[in-house]
């Protein structure tokens, strides 16, 4: 089991070494007319994901995780190359549709890790392992962003990060070819339709699963919107140079990687409710802080809590969902959550792009802060009502209440007896 997990970590490190992270949105934006067009290009990716997401989840449960991981990485290579070679709106739309087909199959990656742990009897350790995995991903992201910044500083060309990044991703494909399919029993339904119907029943009947999906949708949409507009915000809003953007992004990714390493301990110490509340506070506080700070130079530091929330949210959501799901429905239900997130993003992203086109990127903080805070408060309230209610409060003895009067010894004896369990 240890060798399999190490190989998975090596795969994630190779896949996450993305030179193009700080520059892809800037490269595309140069060839488009407005922020609104940028969001339309990105929405093409998410519309493709809407079409492919649910079938991909069912395929991952029926035919295994390794096949879906290979499909994801191979199509990702093509998508990155399409970004690098594209020069217009429809070029980027076509590249995004191919990329989205691959991304639909990425749902099998976390399921592969969980099933590998389940086979060895270590599934309860999943939060710790997925935390390490995210630390490796973000650390590799940081190194990739920094290396991309150096490459741009030397060549003066941001396009080269996409071309080299596409070639590098073949390393991830090679490592994934060595994976061994976990030997766990997956009781699937007789057809894709029945498989999806069973997944929907699980979401509808298990309040914790439904609330976690709502949490995934809300935080996923707002944090992704910030990720999309972050390069534009840092350059146009705060006046940073492209090389400075790469430095800041790599630093924040490294910080998020360190925090992700302690995700298992955070979840164990805080519990599910307080962990969710902490992530909401970090994200909404960071967004609203960006709006309050305006275009000041120190506003870039407010990206720190947003990055921490961005690193913890998928870890905790995946961990809390996996412990509530059976192997035969795990990828299907996770794909339903991803489908809901994608559907919400397809609606919200063009509206956000339209708003920033007619206002400015600074106002984005206010919108994202409110979009994070209000629905998340509903999730937290419902969680306490249905999933994990507040523990009952022990009543204060009446003799300790000021003005309560003195009770007889017999009355105090009855009071003590009433606190014993029957």
Image: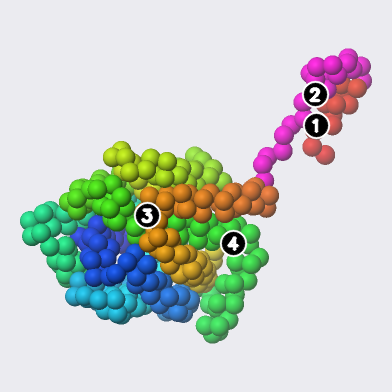
Quadrant location of the N terminus in the rendered image: bottom left
Give the mark nearer the N terminus: 4 vs 1. Answer: 4
In the rendered image, the residue lying farthest to the left is: 154
- Give the percent coordinates (x, y) of residue 59: 44, 79
Per the image, label 1 sits on a secondary structure element best described as loop
The residue to which callout 3 is attached is: 360
The CA span between labels 3 and 1 is 61 Å
Q: What range is drawn magenta here?
A: 389-410
Indicate which disc residue 397 carries. 2
Identify the residue at image location x=16%, y=70%.
163
Give the mark nearer the N terminus: 3 vs 4. Answer: 4
Q: Sort mark 1 into few (<14), some (14-19) or many (20+) by Cα contacts within 10 Å.
A: few
The residue to which callout 1 is attached is: 419
Indicate which disc residue 210 carries. 4
Prevailing secondary structure of the magenta residues: loop
* Magenta span includes 27: no
């Amino acid at each position: 089991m240890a060798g399999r997990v190490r190989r998975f970590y090596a795969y994630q490190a190779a896949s996450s070494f993305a030179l193009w992270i700080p520059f892809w949105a800037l490269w595309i934006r140069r060839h488009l007319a407005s922020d609104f067009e940028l969001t339309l290009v990105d929405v093409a990716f998410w519309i493709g994901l809407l079409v492919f997401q649910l079938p991909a989840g069912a395929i991952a449960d029926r035919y295994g995780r390794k096949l879906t991981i290979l499909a994801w990485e191979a199509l990702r290579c093509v998508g990155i190359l399409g970004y690098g070679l594209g020069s217009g709106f429809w070029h980027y739309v076509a590249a995004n549709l191919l990329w989205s087909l691959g991304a639909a199959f990425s749902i099998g990656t976390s399921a592969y890790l969980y099933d590998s742990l389940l086979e060895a009897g270590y599934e309860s350790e999943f939060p710790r392992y997925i935390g390490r995995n995210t630390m490796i991903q973000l650390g590799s992201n940081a190194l990739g962003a920094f290396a991309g910044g150096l490459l741009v500083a030397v060549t003066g060309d941001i396009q080269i990060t996409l071309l080299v990044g596409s070639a590098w991703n073949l390393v991830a494909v090679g490592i994934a070819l060595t994976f061994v399919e976990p030997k766990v029993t997956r009781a699937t339904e007789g057809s894709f339709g029945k498989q999806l119907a069973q997944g929907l029943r699980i979401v509808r009947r298990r309040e914790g699963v439904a609330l976690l999906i709502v949490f995934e949708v809300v935080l996923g949409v707002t944090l992704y919107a910030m990720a999309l507009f972050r390069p534009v915000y840092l350059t146009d809003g705060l006046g940073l140079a492209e090389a400075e953007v790469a430095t800041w992004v790599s630093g924040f990714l490294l910080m998020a990687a360190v925090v992700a390493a302690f995700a298992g301990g955070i979840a164990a110490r805080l519990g599910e409710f307080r962990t969710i509340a902490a992530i909401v506070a970090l994200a909404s506080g960071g967004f609203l802080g960006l709006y309050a700070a305006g275009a000041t130079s120190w506003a870039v530091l407010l990206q720190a809590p947003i990055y921490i929330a961005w690193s913890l949210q998928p870890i905790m959501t995946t961990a809390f969902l996996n412990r509530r799901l059976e192997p035969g429905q795990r990828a299907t239900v996770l794909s339903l959550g991803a489908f809901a997130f994608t559907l919400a993003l397809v609606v919200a992203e063009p509206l956000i792009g339209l708003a920033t086109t007619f206002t400015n990127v600074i106002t984005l903080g206010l919108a994202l802060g409110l979009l994070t805070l209000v629905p998340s408060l509903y999730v937290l309230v419902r969680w306490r009502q249905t999933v994990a209610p507040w523990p009952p409060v022990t009543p204060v003895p009446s003799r300790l209440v000021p003005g309560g009067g003195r009770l007889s010894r017999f009355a105090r004896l009855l009071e003590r007896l009433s606190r014993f369990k029957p």
